[in-house]
Amino acid sequence: MRILALETSCDETAVAILEDGHRLLAHMVSSQIDIHRRYGGIVPELASRRHMEIIYPLTKDALRSAGLNIDQIDAFAVTNGPGLIGALVVGVSFAKALAYANKKPLVAVDHLNAHFMAVFLEPHPPRFPFVALVVSGGHTSLFYVEGPLRYSLLGQTRDDAAGEAFDKVAKLLGLGYPGGRIISRLAEQGNPQAIALPRPLLEKNNLDFSFSGLKTAVVYYVRECQRQKKPLPLHDLCASFEMAVIDVLVHKALQALKHTHVKRLVVAGGVAANKRLRKTLSEISRQEGFELFIPQPAYCTDNAAMVAVAGYQRLLAGKVEGPELDVYARKLIPRYL
Ligand code: KG4
Ligand code: ZN
């Protein structure tokens, strides 16, 4: 069973081919960072246009690298939300055309479901149930996951996503886009305890997040340095900011494990590529005695291999789509009780 999967929800065009739910035959990601960098963020119109230009050649590349013809593909999977509507439409239209022309089934995949299912690309995936923390540029969400397609929401951000906070702080500091990787590189040479920044944990016993206050604290710190004509301790500021985000993520993840009585944590999404977060979590998992599962960095940031894994599960469950398949910018996921 070979699935060809497509991902165009944001600023990465990605195509992957997966065999029997776990063997990756092709894994192509074309990033649009160079297009959006000069604007300091993603321009939706430009994202859609670039997806349109690249999706067909990238699909041909994926087939070529797997040594396959299109008629050797058994099903197609595509992300249909959440994300940028115009960008999603490109992938979904292309996937529909492929499925129709080749008379093969089409499955639709939720981007956040795909992010935490990426862990099944690893040699030792978790058993169900587990708690999943998805931390990306658009989302910071905690899920209670009972099965590949059965999950409920434990908490989510009420304002900025964790990755968005990295991106906004990087922009504020004039460091460029996207900010996560740049800040974490600078943070390596800084002291994470140097500058006191808030840990916005919101109310106790609540699994929601809030990062906008932290971003504002960085704004005030920068202004204060300017007022006092002090040079900005860039490395220390990056390290302190990174540590504040990590503290909040770790604290909430631990609370979620306690709340659900689960001892398995999956962390996924672009921010899960962060080295210090990975290291901190692995130390804490040993101390607290829970199992930790984080996909390798290439499967944390947006990719289509994760869409193929989640798509395979939908196919097994018979959740096949027709030509009326639509896209969505957001979706309400039922809350865990
Ligand atoms: O999952 P992803 O590729 O796209 C979305 O679905 O949003 O996540 C992208 C986000 C960006 O905000 C980026 O700054 C952040 O992930 N990111 C990182 C790192 N690498 C990417 N944040 C912190 N540290 C990193 N090493
Ligand atoms: Zn993503």
Image (cartoon, rainbow, N blue to C red):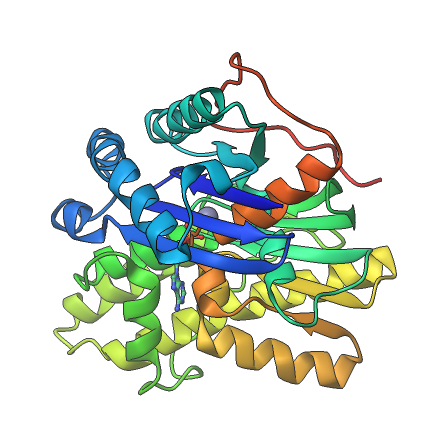
Q: Residue furthest right?
A: 261
Instruction: Judge whether 297 appears above or below 135 on screen.
Output: below
Residue 113 is left or right of residue 335, and the answer is left
The residue located at (15%, 46%) in the rendering is: 35
Which is more toward the observer, 188 or 197?
Answer: 188
Asked whether the viewer can see residue 15, the reply is yes
The residue located at (59%, 31%) in the rendering is: 107
The residue located at (30%, 66%) in the rendering is: 221
Residue 131 falls in image quadrant: bottom right
Residue 44 falls in image quadrant: top left
Which is more toward the observer, 100 or 86?
Answer: 100
Q: Position of residue 134 (x, y in %)?
A: 57, 53
The residue located at (50%, 65%) in the rendering is: 272
**Number of disc labels:** 0
Residue 231 is left or right of residue 102, and the answer is left
Q: Position of residue 124 (x, y in %)?
A: 70, 72
Instruction: Judge whether 212 appears above or below 222 on screen.
Output: above
Q: Position of residue 316 (x, y in %)?
A: 73, 38
Which is more toward the observer, 160 or 267?
Answer: 267
Asked whether the viewer can see residue 11, the reply is no
Residue 240 falls in image quadrant: bottom left
Instruction: Judge whether 331 appears above or below 250 on screen.
Output: above
Q: Position of residue 75 (x, y in %)?
A: 56, 35
The C terminus: image quadrant: top right
